[in-house]
Image (spheres, rainbow, N blue to C red):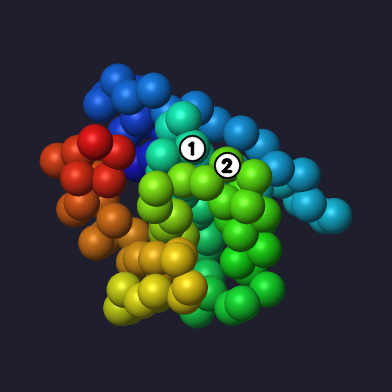
Amino acid sequence: MSIQVCVDILKTDLFLELLKEPSRFRKQIHGDAQVAIDVKGSRQVKNIQLRAIETFCQDNFPRKSIIVCNEKNKRKVGEIYITPWKEFLQEFWPGNIVC
């Protein structure tokens, strides 16, 4: 299930913003710059993949920044939480992320 569907169901004030990159678009989801969420298909998020969310955070100062991905374990790089998608959904559905 996509995050946008979750957002619609929870009826939060989140919206989708498309950030253009050299060769593709990346979906960036945020709600009044309180939470920034970037979704990756990677099994291991590399430092270069943090650029888009870092740039967003410099301009918008979210309370929390999360990259949702296919990694097995949750970890933190600087102020960015790199979170496995299953763990993210367990926190997202009850409203623990966007409250």
Residue at screen point 68% across, 73% down? 48
Figure quadrant of the C terminus = top left
Question: At 53% across and 74% down in the image, what residue appears?
Answer: 45
SS assignment at label 2: helix
Point out the residue furthest to the right here. 22
Q: Is residue 82 above or below residue 55?
A: below
Whether the residues at callouts 2 and 1 have beta carbons within 8 Å, the answer is yes
**Residue at 46% in and 30% down:** 32
Res 98 → quadrant = top left
Compared with 12, 82 (above or below) is below
Residue 63 seen by the camera: yes
Q: Which residue is mark 1?
A: 33
In the rendering, at what x and y percent does residue 88 appear? 29, 56
How many labels sit on residues? 2
Inter-mark Cα distance, 2 to 1: 6 Å
In-image side of 78 versus 27 (left or right): left
Q: Quadrant of residue 80?
A: bottom left
Residue 86: percent from left, percent from top: 26, 60
Which residue is labeled 2 in the image?
Answer: 60
Residue 16, by quadrant, is top right
Give the amino acid type for the residue marked by disc 2 in the picture.
Asn
Q: Earlier in the sequence, mark 2 or mark 1?
A: 1
Q: Tag 1's secondary structure? A: loop
Local crowd at mark 1 within 10 Å, few (<14), some, or many (≥20)? some
Amino acid type of disc 1?
Ala
Above or below residue 38? Residue 79 is: below
Q: Nearer the viewer, residue 47 or 22?
A: 47
Local packing at callout 2 (Cα closer than 10 Å; few below 14, some 14-19, many 20+) is some
